[in-house]
Amino acid sequence: MIGALLKRDLGKFFPFAGGGAALPVVFFVAVAMLYPFAVGPDPQMLARTGGGIVWIAALLAAILPLEKLVAQDIELGVFDQLRLRGMTEETMMVVRLFAHWLSFGPPLILAAFPAAALLALDGPALHLLLLGLIAGTPGLAAIGLMIASLTASLRAGAALSGLLLIPLALPILIFGAGALARQDQASLGFVVATSLLLVAIAPFAAGAAIRAARDV
Amino acid sequence: MHVTGANGTGKTTLIRALAGLITPYGGSVVSEGAVGLLDERTGLDPDQPLGTALHFWESVDRCTDPFATFALLGLEPLLDVPVRYLSTGQRKRAGLAALVNRKVPIWLLDEPLSGLDARAIDQVTALISQHVNEGGIALIASHQPLAIGELTTLAIEPYVPAAETAS
């Protein structure tokens, strides 16, 4: 049952499979492409600020898929039908979290290579950036899932989710981008810790939110 | 059992409470056997062809032979059509097919006949009768008359709190 759900979720969210899901990656690369045009092509400046820009792009790209993440399936009654088949909302959310991360985490990590080239990041910086994204994107996915399920039953949910994600994602951004600025792997440990905590609580928070959405 | 009542008296709420999806304000729900629900939200992905969308539920329910039901409900020609192009009645029939293929003893049906044409109403009523004759339970909320033998009717109005009916 879980396998079938994972297959469906992946088919729904994976880039290039279900039209429009590639948007976060395109957005991410577009920011990296436009930034040198906006601030000028000075390689030193780009190398100094580029890492931070990549992180901001990754964070904003994580907002894009939120609208479709949960609300549509509540509308369709998919979660209701799965509940009737004995699956808990928490299990559904674990599956959805994994599918959501797979659909934007690895593609962003791959897209970080061209982005780093466009922003003249050197080898060690790229190394730190990739490690940071590997550590940080699960946390971003977890925040996104919680926000998407909490705002699913609200009319202006999409606009609100963007606002809500920003403060919650700050720790990941500070430690992730901070590691780049200081060339210091240690602060990536904080990114990992934040991510793990968020991934651990997300299924419970999102599951409770889906149950609460039924009562309205 | 046929649950009747005017719009807004709580037929859907009753069905959702019986399905365990919402918690009733008082009392508790006890059921023996798996419960299946058909309401206006069928859980079928609008972007996918009907066959693919139904196949997801078949794999969840480990149903190996869905096609007999599709034939009974006249869904075979629609399997390649994306769900969003289907009419209300066609979607309802597809939802019922998914329910039948679950092979559960208890059916909760919320307005199973709304949007159906005369032929489809006959098909659906026949399916419900067959389910009941094989020992299954069907609880149907509908304001349309149902041509099913040995049907108990539960009118929901007398149970609505007085303050709400007065307004």
Image (cartoon, coloured by chain):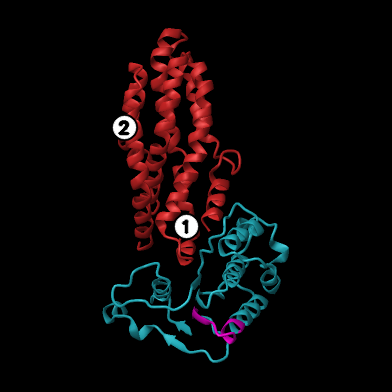
Chain colours: A red, B cyan
| Residue in the image at 47% along x and 24% along y | A31
Residue B62 horizontal side relative to residue B18, left or right: right
Say whether residue A52 is magenta.
Answer: no
> Which chain does the numbered disc 1 sit on?
A
| Residue in the image at 45% along x and 8% along y | A43
Q: Do labels 2 and 1 share a chain?
A: yes
**Residue ID for mark 2:** A170
> Which chain does the numbered disc 2 sit on?
A
Residue sitting nearer the eye, A121 or B155: A121
Residue extent of the magenta highlight: B130-142
**Residue ID for mark 1:** A75
Q: Are the residues at dot 2 and dot 1 in contact (C-beta closer than 8 Å)? A: no
Residue A151 horizontal side relative to residue A107, left or right: left
Amino acid type at mark 1: Glu
Q: Mark 2 or mark 1: which is in front? A: 2
Say whether residue B131 is magenta.
Answer: yes
Q: Residue furthest right?
A: B77
Question: Could you give the CA–CA distance between mark 2 and mark 1, rounded to whole angstroms?
Answer: 31 Å
| Residue in the image at 43% along x and 17% along y | A125
Q: Which mark is residue B76?
A: none
Amino acid type at mark 2: Leu
Question: Could you tell me residue A61's position as x and y percent?
Answer: 45, 33
Q: Note whether residue A159 is visible.
A: no
* Residue B159 to residue A199: above or below: below
Q: Quadrant of residue B14?
A: bottom left
Report the quarter where the C terminus of chain A lies: bottom left
